[in-house]
Image (cartoon, coloured by chain):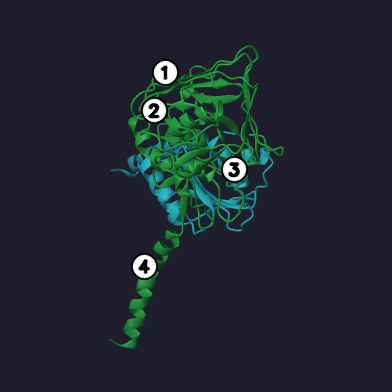
Amino acid sequence: MTRKLRLVIFTLVALTLAPALAHAKRHRFAGPHPMAGGAPFCHIEVEHIHGSGVADNDVAFRAHGQARVFVGDPVAHGYDGPKFAYFGAHPIAVGAFTHSHADDDDIVYCYLAGPHWHVAPPLATASATFTMDDGIYFYVGAFPEAFFEAEPAYARINVSYRAAYVRPVVVAPPPPAWHASAKADIEFAVMIDAPAVVVVPPSVDVEVGAPSVDVEVRGGAGIGIGAGGGVRGGVVIEAPSIDIRPPSIEINAGIGISAGGGVVVGGPAPPPPPRGKVKVKVKGGAGGKVKFKGGGGDRW
Amino acid sequence: MSPRARTWLLTCVAMLAGAGALAGCGDKKSAGSSGVREAWQAAGLEVTAFASVDGANYAGGKCRAGKVAGLDAVLCDYADDAALSRGVEAGYASLGDETAAVVQHGRSILIIADRARVDPDGQRLNRASNLFRGIE
């Protein structure tokens, strides 16, 4: 092969591959999302592309066509725009984040336990399955089987958010219509009741019946959810510091205790997560309330 | 066909074409490309003049290019949905690795790109695209 011919072939190949290689660097997103390397949080709602500098946290993203949609907590990534408080796992219509009706029917799931933020409220069409209590959205609908199937993988997102950041302040127990369905939420709800509550699925009824319950969760890291032994799927709730006041809290967790062991906060590994709903009641007496606070001025 | 009949025929064809063009104008108004410059200006965004560009680069659309809020922007209108789909693809093909979007509204698209890296958090691009979509 002559040198000239080789040059021609090389040029043709380069010209053919150049556009493909250039496009290979693109990352397509739908809705706002964090960027990598300390770059500012991206506020673009409509589907868009970036060439580089994109956060690569798989458990915080879901597929949406050719794009990815961020379902984590934007505030943990420095977002300071309009935000809306949620409690526990819930579905997200992608259209809520992109403001595009074409995306309204694509439902993805957030597995964040406890109070957290998103950039948009639920769609008006989903209002029947959400209830707002004290400025916080609680999902009161049912989850499909696909939610539980993906839970072991996606619930790891809670590990990512172990570090302290300003979460929504919750000053009352979840509304009665809310049930902890996601495993992390079940553990979260149990953990905030008391450090030694034993909860056994599938029939759990934890009642904290005290004249005046005032639970404060403090600490710079707030309530951390970290990886570790104890819970199948690698997620365990760790409470750095829980102060429970007043001194006497009656906890009735005996209902449904049966074969299969139990979920013990800080204890050994629990059984597989229950399908369906696990009811966790937190009942306070007159003026009873549950507070979640972060230390050092970082309230969450 | 007599010369007179041919003249009438041509006149009719021209009128029909004109009617079609007017109908097209109506579509464009609802599509958001015709009034978007005014919407951007009203929202306080800096907008340059938009000059016609070769639509062949955008799958045969009727296109204009300029800048909004320091971002490169191309507005294209299409005659039908099939052409619009080709225009969206052509819009993406025209982009490099910069932060950018191809925003669709009606039978118009906005190709908007931050080639000068002036919008690190995407707020300008978000505002311009939302105004184009008519949701702000």
Q: On residue A72, which mark appears?
A: none
Q: Is residue B12 above or below residue B74?
A: above
Report which residue position mark 2 lands on.
A143
Q: Closer to the observer: label 4 or label 1? A: 1
- Please state, as top left, top right, bottom left or bottom right, where the C terminus of chain A lies in the image: top right
Q: CA distance from mark 3 to mark 4?
A: 42 Å
Residue A283 visible in the displayed image: yes
Quick one: SS at disc 3? helix
Residues under labels 3 and 2: Cα distance?
A: 26 Å
Q: Nearer the viewer, mark 2 or mark 1?
A: 1
A33 lies left or right of A5: right
The residue furthest front is A248
Protein chain holding label 2: A
Residue B66 in the image: state x and y as whole percent. 59, 52
Q: Which mark is residue A16?
A: 4
Q: Which mark is residue A76?
A: 3
In the rendered image, the quadrant that contains the N terminus of chain A is bottom left
Name chain A's colour. Answer: green
Are discs 2 and 1 less than 8 Å apart at CB?
no
Of callouts 3 and 2, the N-terminal one: 3
Disc 2 residue type (three-letter): Phe
Identify the residue under disc 1: A255
Where residue B97 sits: x, y (%)? 50, 59
Residue B6: percent from left, percent from top: 34, 43
Give the residue type at disc 3: Ala
Q: Marks 2 and 1, Cα distance to the nearest angstrom?
A: 24 Å
What hue does chain B carry in this figure? cyan
